[in-house]
Image: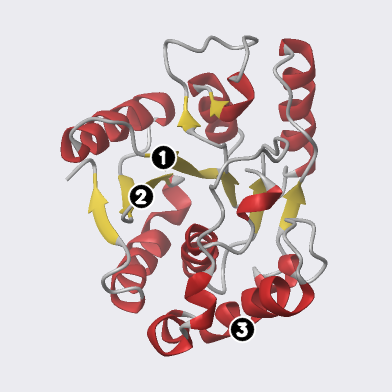
Amino acid sequence: MKNQYFGDINDYRKYGLLRILAGEDLNIGICWMLTPDDDGTDGASVQYLDESGKWRHYDPRLFDYLRQCVKVEGVRSVEHPRLPSLLGNADLHAGWLTDDRDERRRYFDEMLQKFRDIDLVLFDPDNGLEVASVPRGHKNSNKYLYWDEVTAAFQARHSVLVYQHFAREDRESYIARLAAQMQAATGASQIYSFRTARVVYFLAGQPRHEAHFARQARSVAETWLGQFEVGINGE
């Protein structure tokens, strides 16, 4: 995650998804995996905030909040003070993630300690899950989440939600492959995928959360009709 992404169209969908998945029953921890802003155009898609008739109805409270931040206050930062309460008093782990292996280990150890009482953890890497071409500790490894980190969070009794940017391959097979890997890494009986035009989120739920996520996944599909395509176990 980069601060320059805050409030863009992907952020709107992401926070909307989180708000529904948490509902009234679960608390949230967000592991931002923050990296420095760059000169890229990612995060520039905020024109939706000027099109309230098209976008506000999906989540009016969230839309108004993001519009106030971006268009009125000119704030693009995940450390905006009102964000945790909007997400149900979420806990945030907002330190910078570097490419250094030791610093990375400390970062995730601190996150697991901070989130020990959290139900649902969102991991928000720049790109998504690890790729073979970028081993941990190498340049740009801070843009990825590694499978053993997913496993550690699930073994700590957290349900796990992961942001994933689409790769340049067939999307159906891509989702099926990553869902299978997520299932292998966690042992969860069901892996939900929440697909948008550009990204997909994978959810591995703890057994105690299975009935809750079954209800909330239906609510995501209904509330965000046309914005999220919901799948189970790669289908």
Which badge, 1 or 3, comes first in the chain's sequence?
3
Crowd around label 3: few <14 · some 14–19 · many ≥20 (10 Å)? few
Q: What colour scheme governs how the chains and residues are painted in the rendered image of this protein?
A: secondary structure
Q: CA separation, marks 2 and 3?
A: 23 Å
Between 10 and 70, the one nearer to me in the picture: 70
Residue closest to the far bottom: 53
Crowd around label 1: few <14 · some 14–19 · many ≥20 (10 Å)? some
Tag 1–tag 3 contact (CB < 8 Å): no
Q: Position of residue 201 (x, y in %)?
A: 41, 47
Tag 1–tag 2 contact (CB < 8 Å): yes
Q: Position of residue 233 (x, y in %)?
A: 24, 42
Between 157 and 91, the one nearer to me in the picture: 91
Q: Is residue 29 above or below residue 138?
A: below
Mark 1, secondary structure of its residue = strand
Between 58 and 38, the one nearer to me in the picture: 38
Which badge, 2 or 3, comes first in the chain's sequence?
3
Residue at left 58%, top 77%?
62
Crowd around label 2: few <14 · some 14–19 · many ≥20 (10 Å)? few
Residue at left 41%, top 40%?
165
The residue under label 2 is: 198
The residue under label 1 is: 165
The image quadrant where one finds the C terminus is top left
The amino acid type of the residue labelled 1 equals His
Q: Position of residue 234 (x, y in %)?
A: 22, 41
Q: Position of residue 22 (x, y in %)?
A: 54, 65
Q: Does residue 118 appear in the picture of this structure? A: no
Q: Is residue 206 above or below residue 12?
A: above
The amino acid type of the residue labelled 3 equals Asp
Looking at the rendered structure, which numbered label has been put on residue 64? Answer: 3
Q: CA separation, marks 1 and 3?
A: 26 Å
